[in-house]
Amino acid sequence: MTEVRYQLELADLAGHYIDVAIDFVPQAQQPVILALPAWIPGSYMIRDFARHLLDIRAEDTEGPLTLTQLDKQSWSLTPGLLPVTVRYRVYAFDLSVRANYLSSEIAVVNPAATCLQVQGLELQPHQISILRGQAPTHWQLATGLPRTAPTAALAFGDYLASSYAQLIDSPLLAGALDIASFVVDGVPHHLVLCGAVATDSQRIAADLLPLCQTQRQVFGALPADLTEYWFLTWVVDNGYGGLEHRNSTLLLCNRFDLPNPRLPQEYSEEYQNFLALCSHEYFHTWWVKRARPTPYLDYQLAAEQYSTQLWLYEGFTSYYDDLSLLRTGKLSLEQYLTGLAKTISRLERAPANTRQSLADSSFNAWTRFYRQDENAANAIVSYYAKGSLLAFCLDAELHALGLTLDGLMQRCWQQYGARESGSDDQRFFELLASYSQSDALVTTVHSWVNTAALLPLARAAEILGLSLSWRQPEHPLDLSGDKSLPLPSVEPGFLFEGTPEGLKLTAVRNGTAAHQAGFSCGDLLIAVQGLKANENTLKQLLNRANVGDVLQCHLFRQQRLLQLDLTLLPAAATVAVLKPLSQRTAWPGMPWPQPDASDQC
C-alpha cells in the first residue's frame, strides 16, 4: 500500500516558518497534481491558504524535478518512477482557529492550511512526522490524530491518518500544555490549555463532563467510531472562536475567560461564554461532522461548496449550546432567558430579518455572512441567531404535539447521521413529517426557512410556559431586562465606536432617524448641539430629548466638514423581555441526571 509521508518542522519561531517535506512514490509516469485547500471545512469562506506557501521545489534521487504552477493553489509535477520529495515553507502567523500560528510560545497547525494534497493518493494512509525544530524541549504536542507509538502520547514524532480527509480534519497544538482528562461512556476526553495562567484545568474538565453527557443524551449515544476527544484550547490576551473537527475542536479564548481558582463556585459571564463555546463545538461531533448536508459528504476544497442548510446545522447547534448549560445547571433559568432575549433583540433590530431568508443566508454564507461590511445589519440575517430561534419555535410546536426537539434530533441522527448518508431540505422535512405526523407543521417550518418572515416567538414562548414582551431600549447596547423607563426613549439609528476625535459611525440602520438625515457609515461625528461628541454626551442629550426634537450635528466625511440635522424618532420597542409564567415552566424540563460512576474526571 502506498503511503504519503509528511514531515513538518517548527523551523523558525521568530520568523514564523514551518518547513514541510512530502515523500511519495508516483503511480505512473504522468503528471501529478499537488493542491492546497482554499478553505477549511466548518468555516465557509475562501481563505487561499496557498498564499502563505513559499520556496516550493521537487526532486527525486536523480535530481530536481519541474513544478509548474497551474493556479493560485495547485502545481503540476511530472515525475519518473522514483520516489519523489516535495519541499516548501509555510508562513504561520494567523491568530485564528482556521490556519497556522507559530511563535516562541505556541504552535497551532491546521493541516488543511499546511499539507499539499497529492491527487490520486487521497485515500491512502498519510503519515505525518512533527519535528521539534527550534521548539523548546519542554513543549508537548496534542492532536486527535492516532499516534504510531501509543506510549508516546503528547510527544513530537509520528502520527497516522487513514486518508487525506482525516489528516486535514486534525489540528495540532504544541507548547507548554496543561491537560485534564475525563471519561464519557468509556471514551477518554482531554482538555488541553496552552497559554493559560492562574486557572483551574481540573475544574473546567469537571464542568465539561456533564455538558458532554447532556449532549450525548440528545442523540442517544456517542458516535460509534469516537475513541477519544480533544478540546484543544489556545489561550490569548484577546480572541474568541472555535472550529469543529471529527474527534477534536480547536478553541480560542481570552486568558481571563477561564475560571479563577480562588473562586471555585463562581460562574462569571466570561466563563459561561467559554463553556458555551465548548458546548457548541462538541455538539458538532454529531451535528456537522457526521450528520451533515449532502454536498459536504465529499468536501471539494478548491472552491466554494454551497448548501442551503447551515441554518439547520449551525442554528440548531447554537440553540443547544446554551440549553445544555441550563440543563446542567451552569446557567440559571434567569441567566438563560436573558441570553435568549438578547438574541431575540438583536434579530428584531436588524432590518435584514425581513429581507433575507434563512435558506438564502445559508447559501450565501461565502460572500455575505463571512464577509460582512457596514451594511450587514440591513442585508444579512445570521443563520446562527435566527436558526437558533427557529429551533426554539420548532421545539415549542413539537411540545404542543406532545413531542420534543430532542426526539427529532435523534430521528435525524439515526436516519442519516450515524450512517453519514447526508441530508437535504427534502429529507429533513420528510423526517419532520414522519416524526410529527403534521403536514401543517411541515408547511409552517418550510415557510420559516424559505421566506424572510418574522418568527412566531411570542407563540413559542407561551407554549413553553414563558411570556415574551417588548420595551424601548435605554441606549443602543440595551438588549434585555425588564425595566420601566421613566420617559419614552428616542434613538438616532446609528452604531458607533468612540475615538479621541469623536464618534466613528460603524453602521446606519435603514429607516431610522440617522438614515433619513443622511448619515453614513464611516462618518466621524465630532459635535452634537455644539458639544464635543463622545458616548456620554450623546447619551445625556438623547435622555433629555423628545420625539421630534432636532439635534444639530457636525461631522467629518472624507475630510469634509458637514452639518446634518437629526430629527429624533421614537425608539422602536426592540428589547425582548422573557419571563417564566409560573415557578415551574413546561420547558426546558428537568435537568439531565448527574454523572454516573462510569463517567469519571
Image (spheres, helix red, strand yellow):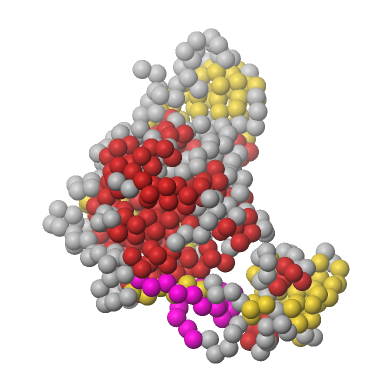
Of all residues, the one furthest to the left in this rendering is 597
Residue 342 x %, y %: 47, 69
As for residue 385 lying within the magenta part, the answer is no
Res. 435 in view:
yes
When asked about the image quadrant of residue 587, the answer is: bottom left
Q: Is residue 571 left or right of residue 129?
A: right
Q: Residue at x 39, y 70 (%)?
A: 337
As for residue 468 lying within the magenta part, the answer is yes
Residue 442 x %, y %: 39, 47
Q: Residue at x 15, y 57 (%)?
A: 596
As drawn, 376 above or below 147:
below
Q: Nearer the viewer, residue 505 or 464?
A: 464
Q: Main secondary structure of the magenta part?
A: loop
Residue 476 x %, y %: 59, 74
Residue 5 x %, y %: 43, 27
The number of numbered badges drawn on the structure is 0
Q: Nearer the viewer, residue 407 or 66?
A: 407
Res. 260 in view:
no
Q: Residue at x 60, y 82 (%)?
A: 489
Q: Is residue 415 left or right of residue 351?
A: left
Where does the C terminus fall, quadrant-wise? bottom left
Q: Nearer the viewer, residue 166 or 102?
A: 166
Query: Which residues, given as a range, are shown in magenta?
Result: 466-484
Q: Residue at x 43, y 40 (%)?
A: 425
Where does the N terminus fall, quadrant-wise? top left
When asked about the image quadrant of residue 518, the answer is: bottom right
When asked about the image quadrant of residue 33, the answer is: top right
Q: Is residue 381 left or right of residue 111?
A: right
As drawn, 9 above or below 250:
above
